[in-house]
Each structure stands twice: as structure tokens, then as C-alpha cells.
Image (cartoon, helix red, strand yellow):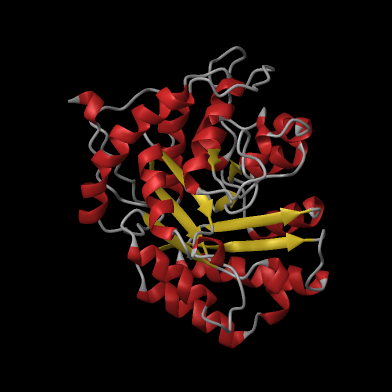
Amino acid sequence: MYLIDSHCHIDGSQFDEDRDEVVRRAKEAGVAAMLNVGTGDPHSDDFRRAVSVAERYDNVFASVGVHPHDAKLYDDRAEEHLIDLVKKSEKVVAWGEIGLDYYYDHSPRDVQQEVFRRQIRIAKRLGLPIIIHSRDADDDTVKILTEEYAVEPALQKPARSKGTSDRPTDSEVTGNENLKADSRKLKADSWNLENSFQQSAISRQPEGESQSFNTGHQPSAISHQSKSPGVMHCFGGTPEMAGQCLELGFYISFAGNVTFKKAEELRDAARVVPLDRLLVETDCPYLTPVPFRGKRNEPAYVVHTARFLAEFYGIEFEKLAEQTTKNFLDLFRANIAIEDTESS
């Protein structure tokens, strides 16, 4: 079994001294791949650096897109630069993170909204899913997404019967006693994947084509083929917002803050997210999960967040790991041959 960190920032200066070791530790923890999300000044080398980090490591992908903090810097030249990076690197699998941030207001709100819409349309044109950042801007985020994306029946939240194992429970999780055992299971399969990643190219398939995901067996829990427009990264909204985003077809990703003691409302939101629309992430170097809170975060720690969510939902850790990996590959249209050692 293995995991994917769906959102990290390992190109940041916080990792300049030990980036190789960070990637190695992630593999050892069972993190088979990670998505390095570019941020910064679109007129600088920030995004080129983010992509170059992805190209340096076989198991790292990249995204480009201007964060709402920097929306005031977005113009035609910035847009052309980012599009050029997409066209030149198959490692770029998404556009983002983009969206609205009314907590800091580093860019004027009207500018954030205009740039958000503009980048959504660019991503559509390029056939890329979007990665959304939304902070203290629930209403405007949902309004813009609703106006920019039509709701299709295939994207509606799947119906679930009460009492199914995929449905989150009210259980609270504080322990990580089984983490080492889980990491050992993850490690074996993660290292087994390395050659597959080295030999496989990322392909962006047309919307109408199915995705291939060869695990050697197909558990009944995995059945979702996504045409989703993107993911709500590091979700921090209400349960109501989560439901609205699910109706629009988005995946929802949770970071380490879902493990925090006082994150009750965030866990309430997690309860409404079905397993086949769930992703896990670190957002490192930020939001380090319990029990490492206060330290620099890194991709290896996504195991702790995934472990927490599995126990919170009342499901097997392996099931959550397998499904969230499937969800990642579906969303970002990654065509990667994976050999499952447990099926051989």
C-alpha cells in the first residue's frame, strides 16, 4: 500500500539544505509520489524552480498558478510565462494554487476575483484541473465556481446508504500507535513503485477517455473515474461549503490541521466527504500534523494525516491509502502503471 502527498511546497528555501533527504524520507515512509505546487512572483524564477524540482525527481509532479496573495502581479506576461512552463514540461499536471484569500488581503479582493476567474478559464483551455486556495472567502469562492463550472450529473455527490463503512463516524482520534506498522507496509510498496515511475510518462487524456490504473486487482471500494474540475486544497471551510464543492464535482483535500485538537468544525466538514472524493496532503512546510506539530512539515508526514482520517472515518488505513491514491491519479489524469506486490 502507498500514499500520495497531493500538495506540498518542497521547492521552498526551507528545504534547500536537505531536499534530497526529504524526498528519500517520504519514500521510506511509503509516500509514492507528491505534487509540488508552485507559488510566488510570476515574473521571477519562482515557478521555473518549482517545475525544475519536479523534473529532478521521478516521483514528484508540479503545478503552476498564481496564488491570491500575488494576484496583483498577474498580467499577460505572467500568464504567458506559466503557459510556457506547462507546454514545456509533462511534469506539470495542474493549474494552481489559485483562489481567494480574504484573511490576509495581500491583493485587493476585486483583483483576486478577476484573476481567479481568468486562471480558471486558462486551466479549462489547457485541460488542466485546478487547485483552489480559499480562506475566509467561502461565499465568493462558491459563487465564482458555480458561475464558471456547470454541474454535470456525473459529478454529483454519489448517494450512500446509512451505516456503510465509507461513511465517516463520530469517533475522535488521538493516537498514532499503529503508524510504524503502517509505514512498514507503505514502504515496501513505495519502493516497488520507483521503477514504474521512472519508466512511465504523465499523459493528459481527453475528457472522454478512461484512465488506466493497473494494480493487479480492483477492490470494490475503487470505482470512481473523475471528470472533476479540481480540488479544494487544505480545506478549511464549513460542512455546508464542503457539500457545495462536492456538488460542483470537486475533490476535497485535508492537511495536518485536521489532526489538531481544536479542529472540531474542520472534522465536521470531513464527515460529509465521501471516500472517493477525498485527498490527503501536507501543504508542507506548513500545518505539521500531530504528533510533530511545531516542527517543519514534510511529505513523509502525510502518513500521519491519512492514519488520523482512516481512524476518524472508521475504515482500514489501507483502504483510505489505496482510494486516495486512485483519486489523485484520476483527478490529475496521471497514466502510471503500478505493480501491486500483494496481488502477486
Q: Is residue 131 visible?
A: yes
Q: Quadrant of the C terminus?
A: top left
Residue ranking furthest to the bottom: 77
Please tell me which residue is depicted at 78% across the width and 73% down the height of the picture: 107
Task: Please provide percent x and percent y for residue 158.
Answer: 56, 30
Residue ranking furthest to the top: 163
Task: Please provide percent x and percent y for residue 302.
Answer: 51, 40
Is 106 left or right of 54, judged from the image as shown? Answer: right
Q: Is residue 225 visible?
A: no
Residues 237 and 263: in front is 263
Residues 285 and 16: in front is 16
Residue ranking furthest to the left: 344
Please tell me which residue is depicted at 24% across the width and 45% down the height of the picture: 337
In this rendering, is residue 240 above or below 64?
Answer: above
Is 72 left or right of 276, judged from the image as shown? Answer: right
The part of the image, by quadrant, that contains residue 323 is: top left
Task: Please provide percent x and percent y for residue 176.
Answer: 55, 24
Residue ranking furthest to the front: 17
Please state the total of marks drawn on the protein image. 0
Residues 47 and 291: in front is 291
In this rendering, is residue 97 above or below 257?
Answer: below
Is 198 left or right of 60, judged from the image as shown? Answer: left
Please tell me which residue is depicted at 35% across the width and 66% down the height of the picture: 55
Q: Quadrant of the N terminus?
A: top left
Task: Please provide percent x and percent y for residue 322.
Answer: 40, 32
Residues 16 and 205: in front is 16
Is 308 left or right of 36, judged from the image as shown? Answer: right
In this rendering, is residue 127 above or below 337?
Answer: below
The part of the image, by quadrant, that contains residue 216 is: top left
In this rendering, is residue 167 above or below 113?
Answer: above
